[in-house]
Image (tube, helix red, strand yellow):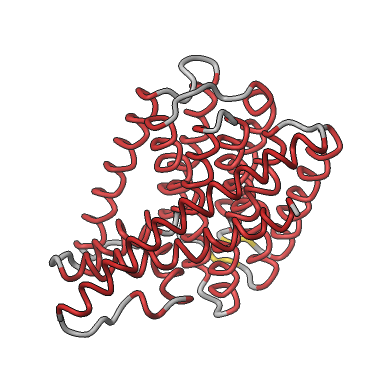
Amino acid sequence: MTALLLAAGFVLLLIGGELLVRGASRLAEELGMSPMLVGLVVVGLGTSTPELAASVQAAIAGSPGIAVGNIVGSNLANTLLILGTAALISPIFVQKSVLWRDGMVGLAGAGLMLVLGHSLGLDRLAGAGFLAILLAYLVFAYRQESQGQKANAAGLRTAAVEHTDPGLHGHPQKDHKGIWKAAIFFLVGIGVIVAGGSILVNAAIDIAESFGVSDAVIGLTIVAAGTSAPELATTVIAAIRKESDIALGNVLGSNIYNIFFIGGVTGLVAPGPIPGGIIEFDLWVLATAASVAVIFAWTGGRLGRREGGILLAAYLAFIAYTVAAA
């Protein structure tokens, strides 16, 4: 029964996220936001709401292991599982400027999490700082896009999402019925996300208690893998279409949003410590994984099938070790 509730929570998060993003993007267009800004901000942040709901509700429920484990585990899944799978499907050719800039932002986020783990924890000051960094990054990304400069991870992540959901763009002309429909989608989406997050977190806590493992293990594995499913789908589709820049950008953009948006909001709404096990091991694994992926891509100019196999094997080894050590 608990497993069914967990699955139901994931499904509700995905449905709610879809409704919220569709409604919010339409409302933003009706309010006169440019398509570029809608993509970078509304679609980018909106597609992170399933992970956000899971982490915030876990922190409120007194389970920081699930809250922080979901953030760290999602980024590990992005870097090792999703990027590795995409590279196995089709080699990813890398724009070194994008990799250096956006890859370093994500790597810096992991470093900041390590520093916070040994000092403030994920408190309100840290949360506010994370959101300020994200805002600065989005302003920078928007200016680059508007000036016709090279693509960035935020914009490429939007492109990946729109590939799998054409309904996010190309809306018809303004009409009052459309606005009301968008508002209903937006509000219903929020409600479904809140319900799904609550069901998922409660089920995850029950699973941790029944198996006698820490909530951090559940957050790093089951919850993180489930909330990363949309990124896996969009990245694989981009890889199949041989759009390697979009596949890489989707992963890098997701890593940035996970740490700075989800971590920032979690710190503001439900401040708390970063569990010791995550500080001592998992964050170091994340920093190492991100560094190795950057080195692979930087030295060869691409992530080939060999590198993809190494990344995927590393993720399976991490999951096996985490479960065995629980």
Whether residue 125 sits left or right of residue 27 in the image: it is: right
Residue 156 x, y percent position in the rendering: 41, 64
Closest to the observer, 32 or 137:
32
Q: Along the horizontal axis of the image, is 95 left or right of 202?
A: left
Q: Residue at x 56, y 34 (%)?
A: 68
State the image quarter where residue 276 is shown. top right
Q: Position of residue 48 (x, y in %)?
A: 45, 53
User: Outermost residue toward the bottom?
Assistant: 172
Q: 67 and 101: which one is in front? A: 67
Q: How many marks?
A: 0
Q: Position of residue 258 (x, y in %)?
A: 48, 45
User: 308 or 189, which is in the foreground?
Assistant: 189
Residue projecting furthest to the front:
1
Residue 152 location in percent, x, y? Answer: 37, 57
Quadrant showing the N terminus: bottom right
Quarter of the rendering containing residue 174: bottom left
Please give the name of the residue rendered at 64% of the width and 31% of the height, measured from the top-left corner: 284
Residue 132 horizontal side relative to residue 233, left or right: left
Does residue 145 appear left or right of residue 286 in this picture?
left
- Position above or below: 175 against 286: below
- What is the quadrant of the C terminus in the image? top right
Classify 281 as above or below 27: above
Name the residue nearer the viewer: 105 or 223.
Answer: 223
Give the residue at the far right of this rendering: 324
x 65%, y 41%: residue: 219
